[in-house]
Amino acid sequence: QVQFVESGGGLVQAGGSRRLSCAASGIFFNMYDMGWYRQAPGKQRELVASIASGGGTNYEDAVKGRFTISRDNAKYTVYLQMNSLKPEDTAVYYCNAVRTLRGGSSLDYWGQGTQVTVSS
């Protein structure tokens, strides 16, 4: 059974930091590209940061220089370190795992989401 346990969300003041964690089970974690998405009220879900199975990273422009994504393959866990938080970072943050298979199909899993609220 595939399961993701997200933690680290909560209320933080602007300028503060928060570290999100997503612990996966039921998948071959090392073979998945991992990502953090967020969805603010009334907005579409957007990619915040991703880290490939090989370790390459990608960030949304709005978080470059403030957020850092990392993974611990031994612990089957992906992290999102968020610094210099702004009120506009307020959203539900979701963990995502994707593995592209031969032939172009893919396996795609989502965590349940964790709320991050940044007060001004």
Image (cartoon, helix red, strand yellow):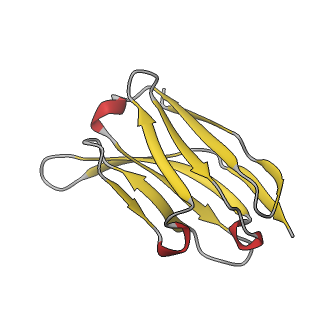
Q: Residue at x 47, y 49 (%)?
A: 69
Find residue 17 and report its horizontal and vertical position in percent. Answer: 71, 51
Disc tally is: 0
Foreground residue among 51 and 94? 51
The C terminus lies in quadrant = bottom right
Q: Does residue 5 appear to the left or right of 99 in the view shown?
A: right
Q: Does residue 114 appear to the left or right of 66 in the view shown?
A: right
Foreground residue among 33 and 14? 14
Residue sitting at the far bottom: 42
Q: Quadrant of residue 26?
A: top left
Residue sitting at the far top: 74
Find residue 25 and report its horizontal and vertical position in percent. Answer: 48, 26
Residue sitting at the far left: 103
Foreground residue among 60 and 66? 66
Q: Does residue 82 appear to the left or right of 76 in the view shown?
A: right
Q: Where 30 sits versus 64, above or below?
A: above
Find residue 75 and report its horizontal and vertical position in percent. Answer: 46, 22
Q: Where 52 sits versus 30, above or below?
A: below
Q: Quadrant of residue 37?
A: bottom right
Q: Residue at x 72, y 78 (%)?
A: 42
Q: Residue at x 56, y 37 (%)?
A: 22
Q: Quadrant of residue 62?
A: bottom right
Find residue 51 and report its horizontal and vertical position in percent. Answer: 37, 49
